[in-house]
Amino acid sequence: MTTAVFGGAVAGVATGAIDVLWSWQALDQFVSGAGKLRLLVYVLGLYGLLAGLGGGAGAALWAFFDRATRLGDLVRHARAAHHAARARNPGEAVAGLSLALAGVPVLAATVGGAYLSAVPLLATRKHFGLVVAVAMVACLGALGLGALITFALARPLELGLRALARRPGWARALSSPRAPALAVAGLVAVAASVAALMAWETLSLLPLRPALVALLALILAAPAMPIGARLNARAQALPVPGPGPVRAALAPALVALVLLTCALTAGRADGVRKAAGAYSGLGGPITRTLRRAVDLDRDGFSPILGGGDCDDWDRLIHPGGIEIPDDGLDQNCVGGDPSASPRSVDEVGFAAVPASVPRDLSVVLITIDTIRADHLGAYGYHRDTSPHIDAVAEDGALFVNGWAHAPSTRYSVPAILTGRWPLQVHYDTSIRGWPGLLDDNETVAEHMQRAGMYTGAVLNYWYFDPQRHMNQGFDYYDNQNQRYHRAVSGKGPAESQGSSSKHQTDKAVSFIDRAGGRRFFLWVHYYDPHYRYEPHPEVPSFGDDEVALYDGEIRYTDLHIGRLIEALKQRGLYQRTAIVITGDHGEGFGENGIDLHGYHLYAAQTKVPLIVRVPGLAPTRVTMPAAHADLVPTLVNLTRGRASAEMLGRSLVDVMSGQAAPDQDRWVFQQLSYENDNEKRAAISQRCHVIYNVSPDTSWELYRVDLDPLEGRDVIDDPGPCGDAREVLGAWYDRTELPAGAADALVPERPALAHPTPVSFGDEVVLLAAEWPSRPVRPGQQVEITYTFEARAPLDGGWKLFAHFEGPGRFLGDHEPPRPLSWWRAGQYIRYTHAVTVPAQARPGRYEVWMGLFRNNQRRPARSDAVEVRDDRALMGTLEVAP
């Protein structure tokens, strides 16, 4: 067994060296110079440790079967028979080889035939148990049939091999004990190669590197075992006192300890771990395995190798933990203990609108799908992709550092429409697929309506269907041009075909004419630069590679944006129309090893054009970072509306008009949440772009965007002037994780209650009162219910409040309090208002209102001397629904 440990460690170290050298150049993203050597040490330690332990485990497993079961007797008997036959006549010791040569293709054929026969037979069957049973029987039958055919074919094949063995030099090779294993490996390799070539289009999209690295380690194990045997012999010859078993185990234990120490020491650097995870086959999985092994409180996070757990004795404290503000603890190990102070309207930064800006200002908001800032001429691109956009930029404010808050339409467009960070938008998750907007949001169109404008949207993507309520505030909302973009089967939202830019401009111009001289707000979305990229004969071709085709899509979109601008000029509207041009997100072309967009916050996916042209304001270039959330406050400010604390960006009017110097120290922020297992946050200044990978693997990245705009080199281990970046992002991250209304829900003393009706839920929570207006409410309207609680202890575990309205019909008002119950502390009072919408189909009549606490199918025990309690729910009053 000790030989297997040494041999496995040698094979693992050799595999690690090959794996690292395979990606030596790509490692520059995270490490360089001495950092690459540290990475090499880290991977060698990980691979050597894993392979050594694997070799020892395999040897121990075989020792068990060899010594404690009849399998060992069978193997020894077969081995003795083979040696005896080989000693008599090597040409006769080819039975094992003949079985191997016959068995692999025969078993493959019978199992494959059973699969091909069973699939059409079982594809339409509904009884799952029957399908499994038939599949098992088919598999066993195929194996049995294959075994019979194998033995039938092996005998004539053995006779042929005997004849071949009579040739000089063949007998020894054909009768070798290793010959059957080598034959099986060769046949499997040939079959796998043929299958891979036939299915390469699919396989090329899969993460095959881990499997290839594991296969390489198995291949290298054969030449490594003799080396392991020699190392073991030397180790056992050392003069070490103690019993024999202790001496035998000491050397491999020391080897494992050395390898583990190398890994833990070299893996302290963030860059080393990230490079191992991104550019080695098994570095990431082995790192995660070691983290899980050292997770004392079993909360899923480790204090070693960047696991991020700052208290491994407390299961409530770890990255991703729920922050409780102002309690002196840092539950998520990032940013310290946050304060729940509400946002001030002064932070929105409205400025006086210069008199030179027309009071009858109209607004055109142009969003372009999938457009990178660095592929436009106004941002220094070498190709002439955007002459019309460039002309608008020359006549307005060009924000050199314009950013999307997220890398996908799903999150960016809501941020543009509401002026909120993507994950702080109020979403309607009841809609199938991507969520829509709740009425709680105040959209830019609603602000423009309030300013007296005729509002319209010309859109072209299924996501904008009215069911997602992005039509809030629009007098005219047209998404019919989505028909020009056909989804590619099986590709989801990642790929589509078709073009709509011409049709978008046609409809946009028609809307302007429909406005008939009224002030208007128009939102037009251009989709064509989205993958797949297609050529357009109407504009110059830049080539036929992917980047050239993408640039051609931008030039085609620009052509039709130019038509829209020209229409404004022809109608005399250009000098009283503000024009905003931005992209919802960017596109990757291999930067950081990533193509397309959707799952990363790097500059390629999130740095977008941001151009604001306002008649009456002089052209300017602004280096201060700006982002999508700034657009709503900027447009509301320009149209002389009112600021709201719901706006999470800031108005850009002061810097565009020269009233204030740009805030050179400003940071803008980014969020990404994908399938609850890809959480990322980021912050950007003029010089720095820091990314916090919350999950699945906790890590930090830092890029000097002023010196390295394509973000090819992570400098997290040498931050220089970006030394405060992690602190800035951590503090912001903590604040954004606090639920909206959490601060206001905590009141300093017990409120005065006209009709207290206390109900205790367990020993932790008392509902002092639930109050709502006594007047009847009509179907489709909302009723606002004010809840007042007394906390006696925190209540962990995801408890929520239910409200059941039961009468002629039934509807619900279930919700989680804005200040989660796990935050509550003894002696606190929590008071908040929650609006419940009476369904439009609700039948008129008197409804009883029952309340309680629930978690999944469980209810918290309820008791009260003031109101009726039944089935752990309290009758808190009645609600009249009018006809």
Image (cartoon, rainbow, N blue to C red):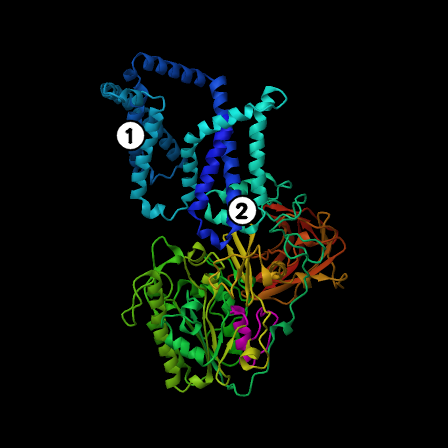
- According to the image, label 1 marks what residue? 105
Q: Is residue 698 above or below residue 89?
A: below
* Element class at badge 1: helix
Q: Position of residue 791 (x, y in %)?
A: 73, 54
Q: CA distance from mark 2 to mark 1?
A: 46 Å
Residue 573 painted magenta: no
Q: Which residue is mark 2?
A: 38
Q: Are marks 2 and 1 in contact (CB under 8 Å)?
A: no
Residue 83 in the image: state x and y as whole percent.
36, 15
Q: Nearer the viewer, residue 622 or 440?
A: 622
Q: Inspect the image, locate mark 1, and give the three-letter code of the amino acid beneath it.
A: Pro
Quadrant for the C terminus in the image: bottom right
What stretch of residues is rendered in magenta? 624-651
Total numbered labels = 2
The image shows residue 413, relative to residue 106, as above or below, that is below
- Depth order, front residue of 562/667: 667
Inspect the image, locate mark 2, and give the three-letter code of the amino acid beneath it: Arg
Left or right: where 88 falls relative to 684: left
Q: 195 above or below 526? A: above
